[in-house]
Image (cartoon, grey):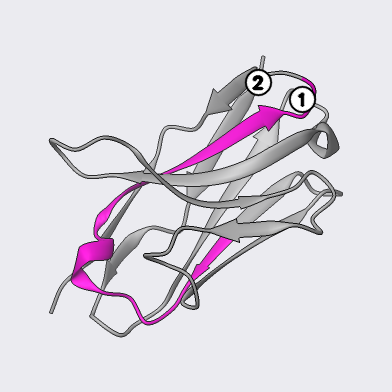
């Protein structure tokens, strides 16, 4: 049974930082591309960042480029999202996603709330 569990969300002031974590179980982690998405009520889920299965390739949406950093630890089946210079518009539920490298099979976590507010 595959599980992705996010943590690290919370309330932070504009300009602050948070680091999200996602731990995976039930899969061969090194065979999965890992991604972070976010969603606000009434809007579609938005892709934020991706990291290749070997950790060498990283991509970011324009809205977070230069502020967020994705990383992974294959030994411990973890993926992280370091979020700096947070803005109010970064407020959302953040989801961890695992996509198998050989096909479109994927899994989602339950999400963690990030609120940026003064």
Q: Kindly identify which numbered label has been placed on residue 12.
A: none
Q: Secondary structure at mark 2?
A: loop
The total number of labels drawn is 2
Q: Residue at x 39, y 40 (%)?
A: 111
Q: Residue at x 64, y 19 (%)?
A: 104
Please state which of residues 62 and 55 is positioned toward the viewer in this rendering.
62
Q: Does 70 sit above or below residue 66? A: above
User: On the picture, is 95 further left or further right than 104?
Assistant: left
Q: Residue at x 48, y 70 (%)?
A: 65
Q: Which mark is residue 2?
A: 2
Q: What residue does disc 1 label? A: 27
State which tag comes first along the sequence, 2 or 1: 2
- Residue 15 falls in which quadrant of the image? bottom left
Farthest front residue in view: 62
**Residue 78 is inside the magenta segment:** no
Label 2: how many residues lie within 10 Å, few (<14), some (14-19) or many (20+)? few
Residue 58 lies left or right of residue 113; in this view the side is right
Residue 100 shown in magenta: yes
Q: Quadrant of residue 30?
A: top right
> Which residue: 50% across, 47% down?
36
Regarding mark 1 in the picture, which secondary structure is present there? Answer: loop
Magenta-tinted stretch: 81-102
* Residue 85: percent from left, percent from top: 37, 82
Q: Are marks 2 and 1 in contact (CB under 8 Å)?
A: yes
Residue 108 horizontal/vertical position (percent): 51, 28
Which quadrant does the C terminus fall into?
bottom left
Q: Position of residue 100 (x, y in %)?
A: 73, 26
* Above or below, 60 relative to 112: below
């Amino acid at each position: 049974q595959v599980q992705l569990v996010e943590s690290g969300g919370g309330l932070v002031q504009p300009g602050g930082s948070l680091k999200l974590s996602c731990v995976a179980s039930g899969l061969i982690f090194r065979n999965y591309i890992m991604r972070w998405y976010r969603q606000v009520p009434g809007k579609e889920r938005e892709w934020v960042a991706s990291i290749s299965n070997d950790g060498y390739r990283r991509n970011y949406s324009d809205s977070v480029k230069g502020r967020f950093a994705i990383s992974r630890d294959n030994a411990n089946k973890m993926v992280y999202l370091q979020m700096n210079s947070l803005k109010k518009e970064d407020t959302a539920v953040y989801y961890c996603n695992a996509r198998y490298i050989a096909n479109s099979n994927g899994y989602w976590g339950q999400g963690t709330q990030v609120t940026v507010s003064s």
